[in-house]
Amino acid sequence: MNIGVAVDDVHQRALPSANESGPAPKRVVVAYGFWIFLLSDIVMFSALFAAYAVLVRATAGGPAGAALFNQGSAAIETACLLASSYTCGLMSLAANERRRANIYLFAFVTFVLGAAFLGLEIREFAAMIDRGATPQRSAFLSAFFTLVGCHGLHVAAGLVWLAVMMAQVAIKGIRGTVERRLLCFALFWHALDIIWVWLFTVVYLMGVRS
Amino acid sequence: MTDTRFDRAPGDRPILTGLEEEASSGLLVYTIGLALAIILTITSFWVANTSLLWGPGIPLGLAVLAVAQMGVHLVFFLHITTGPDNTNNVLALAFGVLIVILVVAGSLWIMTNLNDNMMPPGELMSLPMRP
């Protein structure tokens, strides 16, 4: 008799999930769809990485990576992006707890760190172009600017998205749709960090080495 | 009591359990992830600059460190787990990794082959021209 009570209790406490019949929660479905988009984005980046790896020696007599890249600024950029990924995670936690002040705080820190990353990258590009290392100079530099610039564009788009999300939180409040959009933004931001891990490894660390 | 918590990816939104407890464990997950990522990043930069290690092995070591850091990001930040809710995500990820490896390794393989079989420009010029 007590068993029956216990079984009822289990059903009450069990979470909606894939192993029970019925549709998955909307949050899971939305995250899955966005995850597929992110993977397609990563596949696009893999093509750019392949182009870069093939063309890395095609400097056409121009400057090679070892002469151009500055590991110090790459390290600071990495630190900025990693820290912003962390604060973005804290923002998702704040969204789960529906603490609006914390959402604004962590979103602001994420935005500032992302903007610092972008500023450093633009400064680095400008310095390279000043030295005559423009995308037109060699196939290597075309591939470099395409690959790193594409990641920078993603970060810029992420910053715009974050600003829009904060406006939505302010105007619409933390309701279901806004919450799921925040979740997608967090996935996007973390995925950008994964791409940056490969970028600083393949472009900056291996490039300075060889 | 049956433990039903495996249905939820760590760091995902709590549905029934207490909010306070969840918040601190979510914070812990992100903080562990950050610490591991920092350690791996510093190791990468150290490996790239040290002269203690065998030179030709360093690119491979850097790639391994990058794979490890990617794993840390996937587990601790993107919350990819082995939970039932995550089966689809894991399968999609596996497919994505397959495509990425095909594109990158395939391109490098083909282009290396092409470069090896390409005649050096000097030799091309000295070929006898036949009318």
Image (cartoon, helix red, strand yellow):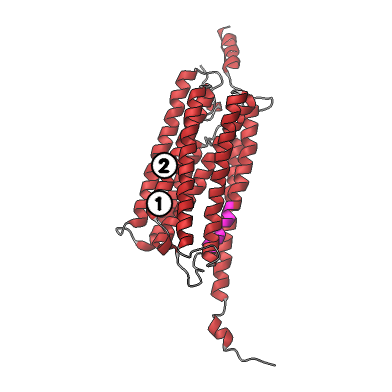
Q: Main secondary structure of the magenta part?
A: helix
**Where residue A53 sits in the image (x, y, percent)?**
52, 61
Q: Which residue shows up at 57% across the image and 75% down it?
A: B117
In the rendered image, residue A85 lying in the magenta stretch gets the answer: no
Question: What range is drawn magenta here?
Answer: A45-54
Which secondary structure, mark 2? helix
**Where residue A67 sits in the image (x, y, percent)?**
41, 64
Q: Which residue position is annotated with label 1?
A: A73
Residue type (three-letter) at the residue carrying disc 1: Ser
Crowding around mark 1 (Cα neighbors within 10 Å: few <14, some 14 to 19, many 20+) is: some
Furthest residue in direction left, as rendered: B52
Q: From what the image shows, is residue A93 above or below residue A137? A: above
Residue type (three-letter) at the residue carrying disc 2: Ala
User: Same subunit under labels 2 and 1?
Assistant: no
Q: Which residue shows up at 58% across the image and 19% down it?
A: A14
**Where residue A113 sits in the image (x, y, percent)?**
45, 40
Q: From what the image shows, is residue A91 above or below residue B130? A: above
Check residue B37 in the rendering and tell me which mark sits there, or answer none. 2
Q: Is residue A168 left or right of residue B58?
A: right
Tell me how many marks there are: 2
Residue B29 visible from this viewpoint: yes
